[in-house]
């Protein structure tokens, strides 16, 4: 393709290799370029907004001032490829490979069991690798900071952090580096008992041995490309231009050129990190014809510290701002740096490391986000914006008028922010910033605040006061009228009460505010005022009146701060999580090659860490492959009047539009259509699909499909509305035993209560994606899909196309997280893509963006539960009546099964003689909620345990005592009439309380709570009886196919195709279905066979009649640790019965045997 007219040459390096591009599109991100153009699929595509870290790469630029390269981690999904001129990019493939040499980072994260599904692992590796390039021996705080921008949904962060701690200089507490043995495994320790221990065997906690790791040698890392070094030291100052189909990227080399361009294109945004413009443009398809990049203008990255204050260039990244603030705080007196300290503290919790490395100070200020952490502090700190234009310079205050968007207080056409000036604080001036979010870091705050007070010299009289809040309006909101009325007041509780009243009257939080929780946000307004009052009061007494509090006279004008209030000033500590996993050590005589009982590295762990594990969308592009985009409903309940695809079909490279009329077979079921025909039942329901040559064209065309609606009533969203309209998906499910009404009449006390449990998104790292490849004859298809239920995809596609099952083959290599969200929905998407492939005769790839995925799919069922409990004064429960309603969404999906499962599990571990459990699945106009890990048990258990806690509070007893009184203690029948032996439950409960030292720890918590008025601690112990089993007997069956190849050394396993039984729902299915084959064929039973000789694959062509797995993630070969299950060879007696296992027909008895509380009996299933 010839380069567009006027485009310059883009030069950068990827993994040490030079990349030269002229035909580069400014709309293309680094992530797309790496995956599509260079074929480097180790960098994963997950959220598309820079929030998950799966696409993390290392960016390096030469710093002429220091003469050294600067390495920093970035999210490739946000970085425009045009911004990389003169940069070096390192991806996970450039760090190490299983084909050549793996890096110590990759080795340690794999051997420390820091990977499960593996989709997030390359991003984790790159964040750690970048940290080590800057700090070969980082501190634990630096380790935590480096990983704050990376999400993991299945492994958990502890093993990932444990792998990183092996590089830390202060990992402290373990002598493993000296003795090659964990301190917890020394004789007599908690995990390694002494010889006289009563435990049956020696226990161990060591999951990996540090002595086996390759050492980190910083001198062996790749050098920065000399060509880029020369380019940085002698930069060309001419303007670079890159032209695309819709957008032109202009990068001036001097400030004067930038000002001229700004005057010529006053509406063109200035783009540095793309952290604001990128995510904002994606859902709406917005486009700017011209983008100006000031990254090559050195004046915008300068900083100057004068006697009046600190001036920071608007082009400095937030990470650079952190460094600049730290230097100023270190060299200036504390009384001058209170605004700087508040900003530095806010930056530590703002976004993740990757975003701070990209986002600029000027961009953050000018974006004027309502949830900004910095703007409230800058506003109260009297910050000013230094503006430049061709007409000259100008300074405007960053005040309430600017933040409110008043035209006279903002930028004029052609102006730009050159720098931000932050004045030094005065002696009697105090500045603080606060935020409240769902997480201490990398989370958008519900409310942020900046507060400043200036006292008259030597007094507590308020001379000046500023208050600003974020998260309570469309932009940062200030309270100037309230502050004006408080001038001259003394810093007392009376003034505090008046301030709270005034602020609540002036700052209005609308009930329709995005994110909701308006009342909670109003509470935070007052809470931050109170914390600021306490903080200033505490600092006044400790700094300006040194000495113990007793030395202050009662006549002192500074009020005394009660000791119990001091906890309000403390931040919650963020530390590296630690844990201990103990397991029985293997017999010293056991052969080293025998894997049973040993902590084995994930069989795909190294491939995860090197990015060489292939996921669905990592498959290479096929010849003549098409991309599909979905057109979804924008109305919750409406009649479809018309669908007009004409404008979409007129766009270039658009091949076809797939509607329900193109389906040759069945269009789903009566209540759950694949493609909506006459009516839509929720926002996000699929109406049709567009097929085009590229995914960009397909998405643009999908936006051009015009759908006309006629709204219908009622529109139901909540469970309460569904109950009001009697809108249910299935009949009521009910279990009852005893005489509930008689029991209530005889009890000492009766309590009633309600429990509301919200929903939950699956948020699997790998979004829904499918590739359908049609074959040359008989309408045969190969479907490569990310699913937990390949057979369901196969059946749905075959039914939709009206072809036999044998003509559809479904392949699943691995799944990047599922949690139940990839049981049913992949079948719908696979069938729609299959229709497109058959209609066009070409391969079709469908990959959902994160926004589309969360819009189309449902999640965990929200629940509304009501309980009525009758109990004796001793805490013994005599009668319990629970009624539960779950929000099933617009179609049945798995809601009926979830309701049944919920009702069956409601009794938990308690034996109550008189019970009545009822459950209903509500039909609402929301996407259908579906299977989710726990399958209704977490919601139901919360209702039951809330009831137990309420009883304990009413009786004045510890909750554990009430739980013990009501637990199963003798062999009995459950509410579903299954015999249950509670002996293991009792032993587990007693051991847990003993080893946890519950009584002493509760006493410590109580003592802490007496001393702390605001911060509180608590501890609880809850028993759980999670019975396994499903109503369908076939779900208890697993199957597999093993291909064995004879060789001179003996048997060598070539292919294993295992199938986990659904009875493992809620457990770690991936670990289970690979560990048993390891034991069945380990070298002790089959000499010459090594577990490294396994090859895992999944296909409906070789393993028929699959039943779904609902485990954590899905990767063929995951096994953190082998369990001690009896190994079974082919042709040997079945451990679960006395029959002989045939060579070709697998025994259908689930093994290992299910828990004694299994719902379904397994007797007689061997055939």
Image (tube, helix red, strand yellow):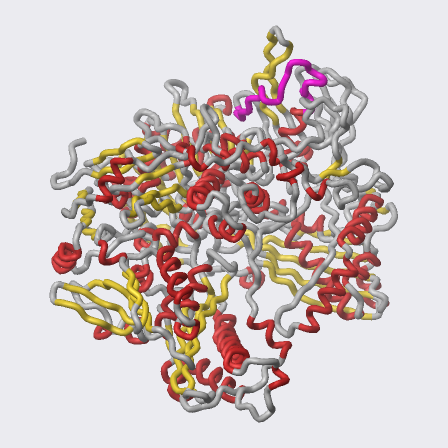
Q: Tell me the residue at 31%/72% (across/down).
A: 307
Q: Front-most of 823 and 984?
A: 984
Residue in view at x 84 percent, y 58 percent: 965
User: In the rendered view, would you say 1146 is above or below 701?
Assistant: above
Nearest the camera: 822 or 739? 822
Residue 1020 position by quadrant: bottom right
| Residue 865 visible in the current orientation | yes
Identity of the residue drawn at 71% across and 18% down: 1084
**Residue 139, position as x, y percentages in the image:** 52, 50
Can residue 1088 be found in the magenta stretch? Answer: yes
Q: Could you tell me residue 373's position as x and y percent?
A: 41, 65
Question: Which region is colored magenta?
Answer: 1079-1100
Task: Give the prevailing secondary structure in the magenta stretch.
Answer: loop
- The answer to whether residue 679 of the structure is visible from this angle is no
Residue 508 image position (x, y, % from top left): 42, 77
Q: Is residue 784 left or right of residue 313?
A: right
Q: Which quadrant of the figure contains the C terminus?
A: top right
User: Horizontally, is 928 left or right of 510 in the view?
Assistant: right
407 left or right of 1145?
left
Is the residue 877 above or below the residue 95 in the image? below
């Amino acid at each position: 393709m010839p380069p567009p007219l006027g485009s310059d040459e883009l030069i950068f390096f990827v993994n040490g290799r030079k990349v030269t591009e002229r035909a580069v599109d400014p709309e293309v991100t680094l992530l797309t370029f790496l995956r599509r153009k260079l074929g480097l699929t180790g960098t994963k595509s997950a959220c598309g907004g820079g929030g998950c870290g799966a696409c993390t790469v290392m960016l390096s630029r030469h710093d002429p001032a220091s003469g050294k390269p600067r390495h920093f981690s970035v999210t490739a999904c946000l970085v425009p490829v045009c911004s990389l001129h003169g940069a070096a990019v390192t991806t996970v493939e450039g760090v190490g490979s299983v084909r050549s040499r793996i890096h110590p980072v990759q080795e340690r994260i794999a051997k420390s069991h820091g990977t499960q599904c593996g989709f997030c692992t390359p991003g984790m590796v790159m964040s750690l690798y970048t940290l080590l390039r800057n700090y070969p021996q980082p501190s634990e705080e630096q380790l935590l900071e480096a990983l704050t921008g990376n999400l993991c949904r299945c492994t958990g962060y502890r093993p990932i952090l444990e792998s990183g701690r092996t590089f830390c200089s202060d990992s402290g507490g373990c002598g493993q580096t000296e003795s090659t043995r964990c301190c917890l495994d020394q004789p007599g320790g908690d995990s390694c008992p002494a010889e006289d221990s009563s435990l049956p065997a020696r226990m161990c906690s060591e999951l990996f041995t540090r002595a086996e790791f390759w050492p980190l040698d910083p001198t062996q890392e790749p050098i920065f490309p000399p060509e880029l070094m020369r380019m940085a030291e002698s930069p060309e100052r001419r303007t670079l231009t890159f032209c695309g189909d819709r957008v032109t990227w202009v990068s001036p080399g001097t400030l004067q050129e930038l000002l001229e361009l700004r005057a010529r294109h006053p509406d063109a945004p200035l783009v540095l990190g793309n952290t604001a413009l990128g995510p904002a443009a994606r859902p709406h398809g917005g486009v700017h014809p011209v983008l100006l990049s000031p990254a090559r203008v050195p004046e915008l990255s300068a900083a100057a510290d004068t006697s009046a204050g600190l001036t920071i260039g608007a082009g400095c990244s937030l990470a650079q701002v952190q460094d600049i603030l730290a230097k100023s705080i270190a060299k200036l007196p504390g009384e001058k740096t209170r605004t700087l300290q508040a900003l530095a503290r806010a930056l530590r919790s703002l976004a993740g490391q990757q975003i701070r490395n990209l986002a600029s100070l000027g961009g953050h200020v000018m974006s004027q986000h309502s949830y900004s952490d910095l703007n409230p502090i800058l506003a109260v700190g009297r910050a000013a914006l230094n503006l430049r234009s061709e007409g000259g310079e100008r300074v405007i205050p960053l005040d309430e008028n600017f933040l409110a968007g008043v035209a006279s207080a903002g930028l004029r056409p052609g102006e730009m922010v050159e720098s931000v000036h932050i004045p030094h604080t005065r002696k009697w001036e105090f500045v603080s910033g606060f935020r409240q979010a769902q997480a201490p870091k990398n989370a958008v705050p519900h409310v942020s605040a900046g507060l400043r007070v200036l006292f008259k010299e030597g007094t507590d009289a308020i001379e000046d006061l500023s208050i600003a809040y974020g998260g309570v309006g469309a932009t940062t909101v200030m309270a100037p009228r309230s502050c004006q009325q408080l001038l001259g007041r003394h810093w007392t509780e009376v003034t505090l009460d008046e301030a709270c009243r005034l602020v609540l009257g002036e700052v209005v939080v609308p009930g329709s505010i995005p994110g909701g929780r308006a009342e909670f946000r109003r509470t935070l307004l007052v809470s931050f005022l109170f914390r600021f009052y306490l903080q200033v009061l505490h600092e006044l007494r400790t700094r300006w009146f040194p000495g113990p509090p007793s030395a202050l006279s009662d006549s002192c004008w500074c009020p005394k701060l009660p000791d119990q209030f001091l906890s309000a000033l403390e931040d919650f500590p963020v530390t590296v999580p630690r844990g201990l996993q103990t397991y029985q050590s293997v017999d010293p005589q056991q052969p080293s090659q025998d894997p049973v009982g040993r902590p084995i590295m994930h069989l795909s762990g190294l491939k995860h860490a090197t990015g060489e594990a292939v996921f669905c969308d990592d498959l290479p592009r096929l010849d003549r492959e098409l991309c599909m985009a979905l057109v979804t409903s924008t109305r919750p309940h409406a009649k479809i009047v018309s669908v007009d695809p004409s404008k979409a079909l007129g766009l270039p490279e658009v091949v076809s539009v797939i509607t329900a009329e193109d389906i040759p077979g069945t269009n789903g079921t009566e209540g759950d259509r694949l493609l909506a025909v006459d009516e839509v039942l929720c926002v996000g329901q699929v109406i049709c699909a567009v097929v085009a040559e590229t995914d960009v064209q397909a998405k643009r065309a999908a936006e051009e499909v015009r759908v006309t609606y006629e709204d219908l009533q009622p529109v139901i969203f909540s469970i309460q509305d569904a109950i009001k309209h009697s809108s249910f998906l299935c009949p009521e499910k009910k279990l009852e035993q005893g005489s509930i009404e008689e029991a209530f009449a005889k009890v000492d006390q009766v309590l009633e209560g309600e429990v509301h449990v919200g929903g939950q998104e699956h948020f699997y790292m790998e979004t829904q994606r499918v590739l359908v490849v049609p074959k040359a004859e008989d309408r045969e298809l190969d479907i490569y899909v990310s699913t937990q239920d390949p057979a369901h995809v196969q059946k749905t596609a075959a039914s939709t196309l009206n072809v036999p099952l044998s003509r559809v083959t479904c392949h699943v290599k691995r799944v990047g997280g599922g949690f139940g969200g990839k049981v049913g929905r992949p079948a719908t998407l696979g069938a729609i893509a299959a229709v497109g492939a058959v209609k066009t005769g070409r391969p079709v790839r469908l990959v959902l963006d994160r926004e589309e995925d969360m819009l189309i799919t449902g999640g965990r069922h929200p629940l509304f539960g009501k309980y009525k409990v009758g109990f004796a004064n001793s805490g013994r429960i005599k009668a319990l009546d629970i009624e539960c309603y779950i929000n099933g969404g617009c179609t049945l999906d798995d809601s009926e099964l979830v309701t049944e499962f919920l009702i069956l599990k409601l009794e938990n571990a308690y034996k109550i003689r008189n019970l009545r459990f009822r459950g209903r699945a509500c039909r609402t106009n929301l996407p259908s909620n579906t299977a989710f890990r726990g399958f209704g048990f977490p919601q139901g258990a919360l209702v039951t345990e809330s009831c137990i806690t309420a009883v304990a509070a009413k009786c004045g007893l510890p909750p554990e005592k009430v739980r013990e009184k009501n637990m199963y203690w003798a062999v009995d029948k459950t509410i579903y009439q299954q015999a249950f032996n509670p002996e293991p439950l009792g032993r587990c409960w007693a051991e847990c309380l003993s080893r946890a030292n519950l009584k002493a720890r509760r006493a410590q918590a109580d003592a802490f709570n007496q001393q702390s008025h605001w911060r509180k601690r608590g501890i609880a112990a809850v028993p759980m009886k999670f019975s396994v089993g499903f109503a369908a007997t076939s779900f208890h069956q697993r199957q597999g196919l093993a291909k064995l190849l004879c060789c001179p050394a003996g048997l060598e396993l070539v292919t294993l195709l295992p199938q986990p039984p659904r009875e493992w729902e809620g457990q770690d299915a991936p670990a289970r279905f690979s560990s048993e084959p390891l034991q069945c064929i380990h070298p002790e039973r089959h000499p010459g066979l090594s577990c490294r000789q396994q090859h895992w694959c999944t296909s409906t062509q070789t393993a028929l009649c699959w039943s779904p797995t609902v485990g954590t993630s899905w990767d063929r070969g995951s096994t953190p640790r082998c369990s001690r299950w009896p190994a079974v060879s082919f042709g040997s007696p079945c451990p679960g019965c006395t029959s002989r296992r045939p060579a070709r027909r697998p025994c259908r008895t689930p093994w290992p045997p299910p828990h004694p509380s299994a719902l379904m009996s397994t007797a007689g299933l061997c055939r």
